[in-house]
Image (cartoon, rainbow, N blue to C red):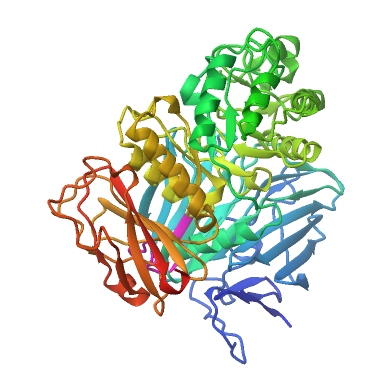
Amino acid sequence: MSLHRLSGDGVALLLQTAGDPAVVHFGADPGALPGRESTGPVLHSNYDHPLSMPLWPQASAGWAGTPLLEGGRGGRDTSVRFTDPEVRRGDSQLVLTATDAEAGLELETTVELLPGGLLRLRHALTNTGDAGYEVRALNTMLPVGQQATELLDTAGRWSRERSEQRLPFVTGTHARTGRRGRTGHDAPLLLAAGTPGFAHRRGELWAAHLGWSGNSTVFAERTADPSRALGAGELPGTGEIVLETGQSHTGPWVYFAYSPAGLDGVASRFHTYLRSRPGHPRRARPVVLNTWEAVYFRHDLDELVSLAHAAAEAGVERFVLDDGWFGSRRDDTSGLGDWQVSGQVWPEGLVPLISRVNELGMEFGLWVEPEMANPDSALATDHPDWLCRARGDRLAPTWRNQHVVDLTVPEAYTHLFTALDAVLTDAAQAGAPISFLKWDQNRDLTDLASAGRPSQHGQTLAAYALMDQLKAAHPGLEIESCSSGGARVDLGVLEHADRVWASDSNDALERQHIQELTQRVLAPELVGQHIGPATSHTSGRTHALAFRGITALFGHFGLEWDIREARGADRATLHQLVGLYKKHRGLLHSGIQVRADLGDAAFSLYGTVAADGGEALYAFALLRSSEGAGPGVIALPGLQEEKTYRVRAIVPGREPGTFIHREPPAWLEDGFTATGSYLSTVGLALPALNPERAILLHAEALEAL
């Protein structure tokens, strides 16, 4: 049998494996298959065989677009031909293996249909020849429907990650290459192709995500054949991946999603898969307080104990000490790389603080940045050969006063593991365990090399390995991937970390957009979202506490400001917000994420609906002034039509200035009861808000009350 099928959750992939393997279909499950295969015509001024979308795009088979493989042996064996694969089938998996004996290469492609209908593919290449083979590219591609005429991806910068951009899907290649040595603030977290105007809950679309944290390419390609495809792959440097005889290289997973119902459908597929993983966080995600914007480098035991008391009183469950606890690190110019507790700042070590935090009922977490070092550090002074060098004595320019530690040097890797392991072990043996590491990476890794040879591939794998080794040595340890905010957010690092820090911006208005686009791929419980200071330290904007709190609520909730400043009404509102998170986090971290498509982009309505439809929690916000006099009647997406719901408004703190109406909608005080069909079709007359304000709506099925 040469036609193979993977299908489930409304998605199907059909592969023709005789001869040159071809993707017959990727998209909606077509149900029963016809009795014979459908082949295309042989075109004028073209190859003498029908055109199809290859699983393995190869110039040797007539493919003129982006190829599966680029490489060679010093100019030899650059043309490859893999055909007639052996196919092994497992549960929701196909493994295709083929050999090009003349080129001395063997290719293995693994295709998996994941829970939720998400698809992922990766290739492994083995050198069977008698000389080294350099791999320059190993790309994975799948076709999208002819109706996909519009593209969407994300760009961005520090503190404004994942800014949406749209463009027409025209002939040619739209390639987003990342050469930063890390995923990047400007990375296309998701590249989607769909029908014109596809939105949260409308339109048919296909999407791709690369699960890799180093240099990369993600692309959309349209040829005159006509074919449209999405693809991705690692982007190694010249000479970086050279396979000696018998050696193999496995590319990263590329994830593909199909949705007949907009971006919400794509998010649902990613979230369902992520929650099915054995290593996915299972226990309730604790309320976090991170000390950075409260004290910065001003570490003082009495001051931090005072902050810890305020945190415990507010309901915090994890207290994280940020940068400044080690070596000579009193600011960002010195000490980075010296992972020993500073005797100057902490003469008795960290145990007195950790013990007090634990006594207050909170876990303790610690900031680290193992991949970097200040020039003014013992590591850089004593071991200059441990810093990444492109050539001779030439170091890349500093970034935030940092150089990159070469993790591919065994002695450097071992030194870092030993130092960090000692910090964790010493604390545990003193009865003051550290249960969480905020793992930062504060610079791009351009011109990254080890002993004069490009090394972003090895550096990325070594960072992954260091995380894994520390977690194996300290069972229960959780790690956050932070990279000067959201510059290392991908499913590659999330095979090793337990959450990401979405952005260094705690400006709630910026965060509304950053978090929305981050959660198109990542489940909310994997995304760190904190309430920042009243006036943002990155943007200078000032926001009411309720708006900041509601913005942080729909993720892994936390606080990042000196909450001792919250007094009176603000203190009560803070308690209410923490209580709301604890009450609803089970729903927020297991339910189906929904976003309404509204005619006015000034308004935002989003939420989470329980898988059984028993309840839902929505946020309704006005992000900027609207052209209209009010929001009008807005439907609540995702509710089950046959259930009857009681909808109640939650207005944290009842802060003055939240509303601008003279009289509220009649239902606002005592609730509104209607069927899910009515609420998701007609909706509710929502209150008039001032800009940069938000309220919550809780819908509960009557049978659940």
Residue 123, percent from left and from top: 70, 57
Give the residue drawn at x 75%, y 67%: 96
Q: Nearer the viewer, residue 149 or 28?
A: 28
Q: Does the image show residue 3?
A: yes
Give the residue drawn at x 47%, y 65%: 265
Q: Nearer the viewer, residue 344 or 648?
A: 648
Residue 199 is a magenta residue: yes
Q: Is residue 188 above or below residue 79?
A: above
State the image quarter where residue 443 is shown. top right
Residue 483 is a magenta residue: no
In the image, 140: left or right of 591?
right
Overall secondary structure of the magenta stretch? Answer: loop
Image quarter hosting the N terminus = bottom right
Q: Outermost residue toward the top?
A: 344
Magenta span covers which residues?
A: 190-205
Q: Is residue 508 above or below residue 533?
A: below
Q: Does the image show residue 169?
A: no
Residue 409, percent from left and from top: 78, 26
Q: Outermost residue toward the bottom?
A: 35
In the image, 263: left or right of 23?
left
Give the residue drawn at x 53%, y 16%: 303
Q: Is residue 455 above or below residue 143?
A: above
Give the residue drawn at x 57%, y 64%: 142
Residue 194, percent from left and from top: 41, 64
Residue 326, percent from left and from top: 66, 16
State the image quarter where residue 209 is shown. bottom right
* Number of numbered discs visible in the structure rendering: 0
Image quarter hosting the C terminus = bottom left
